[in-house]
Each structure stands twice: as structure tokens, then as C-alpha cells.
Image (cartoon, grey):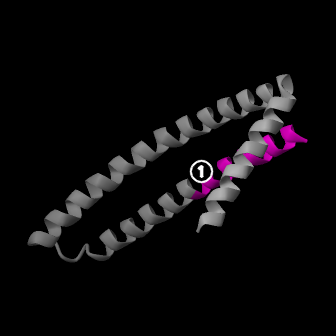
Amino acid sequence: MTAKKMTAAHDEVQISSETLIGDFKALMADAEDLIKATAGHEEGPLSAIRSKALETLNSAKESLSSVEGTLTEKAKVVAEGADEFVHRNPWEAVGVAAGLGLLIGLFIRRR
């Protein structure tokens, strides 16, 4: 039962990270659209801001690609480690889950 909870938690973390990456990609696409919409203003300070924004956007795309791959690999390693721990020490995993549940419950109750 605890292994299922750990797997579900891993799936939830992976979905959250995928959602975050998807949101960031959407933000970059919107920024690109905004930059393209200002293409008619080729003189003055707006042009300088536009070119700097394009450079930053391209850099962010490259960084996102590398982070996405790294994040996926780390998530897989963590999930495998958690799964292995739960299979070796099921009662310890139950105790840790109960303790975390108690702490979270106490923090929520204080609000």
C-alpha cells in the first residue's frame, strides 16, 4: 500500500514539473508573439529592448531544454530510489508517511 502512495507521489511531482515546463513554454511563446507584434518599431529604444528580449528568449529556450532533460532524469532516479526503499523497509515507509501526514495536519490546523 505504501509503495502505491510513493508511486502516486512521484507521478504527482512529475506531472507538476511537466505542467511548470509547459507553462514556461507557453510564456515564451507569448513573449515571442509580443516581440513579433512590435517588429514595426525598428528605431529608438523599443528596438534595443526588442533585440535584447530576443536574445534572452533564445537563451531561455536553450536553458529550458537542458533543464527539462536533467529534471526528467533526476525524477526517474528519485522515484527508483523511493520505490527500492519502500520495498526494503515497508514499515519504516509507513512510519515516515504517518509522521509527515501528522506534521502537515498540524501545520494546516494552525492556519
Q: Residue furthest right?
A: 1
| Residue 70 is at least partly visible in this image | yes
For the point 22% across and 77% down, the residue is: 40
Does 38 appear above or below 88? below
Report which residue position mark 1 lands on.
17
Q: Is residue 81 left or right of residue 44?
A: right
Q: Quadrant of the N terminus?
A: top right
Q: Is residue 23 left or right of residue 35?
A: right
Q: Nearer the viewer, residue 14 or 52?
A: 14
Q: Is residue 8 magenta?
A: yes
Q: Nearer the viewer, residue 105 or 31?
A: 105
Q: Nearer the viewer, residue 45 or 89?
A: 89
For the point 54% across and 54% down, the residue is: 21
**Predominant secondary structure, magenta span:** helix
What percent of the width, then of the height, locates residue 9?
74, 47
Report the magenta residues as a range: 1-19
Marks counted in the figure total 1
- Check disc 1 and give the amino acid type: Ser
Q: Is residue 14 magenta?
A: yes
| Residue 11 is at least partly visible in this image | no
What percent of the width, then of the height, locates residue 74?
60, 33
Does 26 appear above or below 55? below
Q: Residue furthest left?
A: 44
Q: Is residue 96 left or right of residue 47?
A: right
What percent of the width, then of the height, locates residue 8?
79, 47
What percent of the width, then of the height, locates residue 28?
42, 61
Q: Nearer the viewer, residue 39 or 103?
A: 103
